[in-house]
Amino acid sequence: MARKSPKKKSKLREYVEVITISVLLALVVRTYVVQAFRIPSGSMEDTLLVGDFLLVSKFIYRFTDPKQGDIIVFKYPLDTRRDFIKRCVAVEGQTVQVINKVLYVDGKLISNPPQSKFVDFKTYPQGASTRDNFGPVKVPAGHLFVMGDNRDNSRDSRYWGFLDKRLIKGKAFILYWSWNRMPGDPELAKWNDPFYLALPKFIFSFFRVLVFDIIFSPWRVRWSRIGNLIH
């Protein structure tokens, strides 16, 4: 007796299965492994520039605690719907003080000229502003003290306080794209938006980057930054 050959799947069903599996894998990767972010402001210049696209490791802090010097992405404590990126300058138990724009941790000068940027010649006295003179304060358990590398233009722990480690999303580790966006340019893919995880939107966004960045304005792509590790 001849055996019936297995029923062949329709093309539509194959496409639906591929798209479903791809979306599920993307959701798992985005939730537990790695997530893409875009730099929207200059608070981390010149380490990170507006138009930089980076990847964030979401699992590393499951095995280790954030360290002094790590660049981390976290939910903004005053509005957890927004994501911020800053450098961890002190961990729990350490004492932070800023004196005339100079950072001290546990009484020791923290000097990182390549990482710190100052653009304002003014120095505000303590009491007038927390930007240039702050502390000393001790970082409580379960918290971090974070600052932007662009010290004169960064809303960070000097203004809104310590960062609860439970708000951390991950550690920034590599730049995968960088584009010098100009006023009037088309809006690029909203990589932070979960809506864009749907495969058709992801593909559409990828081709927008390909067309507008590489074909129409390749001179705006910061080729030398692509693939750089973030320190």
Image: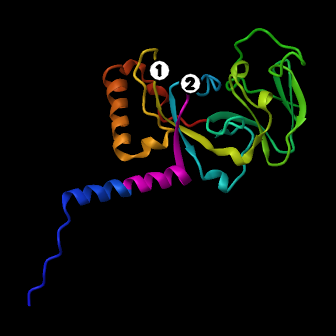
Q: Position of residue 138 (x, y in %)?
A: 89, 38
Q: Position of residue 153 (x, y in %)?
A: 69, 19
Quadrant position of the N terminus in the picture: bottom left
- Which residue is outermost to the bottom? 1
Residue at horizontal 89 percent and vertical 34 percent from the top:
137
Task: Give the magenta part as a residue range.
Answer: 22-40
Give the residue pinned by disc 1: 180
Q: Identify the element where label 2 is drawn.
A: loop
How far apart are labels 1 and 2 at the CA level? Answer: 9 Å
- Which residue is outermost to the left? 1
From what the image shows, is residue 135 above or below residue 8?
Answer: above
Q: Quadrant of residue 10?
A: bottom left
Q: Is residue 164 left or right of residue 85?
A: right
Task: Find out whether the residues at labels 1 and 2 contact each other: C-beta distance under 8 Å.
Answer: yes
Q: Identify the element where label 1 is drawn.
A: loop
Q: Residues within 10 Å of mark 1 (few under 14, many from 20)?
A: some
Quadrant position of the C terminus in the picture: top right
Q: Is residue 139 left or right of residue 187?
A: right
User: What amino acid does circle 2 point to?
Assistant: Leu
Residue 49 is labelled as 2
Q: Position of residue 9 (x, y in %)?
A: 20, 65
228 falls in the magenta region: no
Q: Is residue 75 left or right of residue 228?
A: right
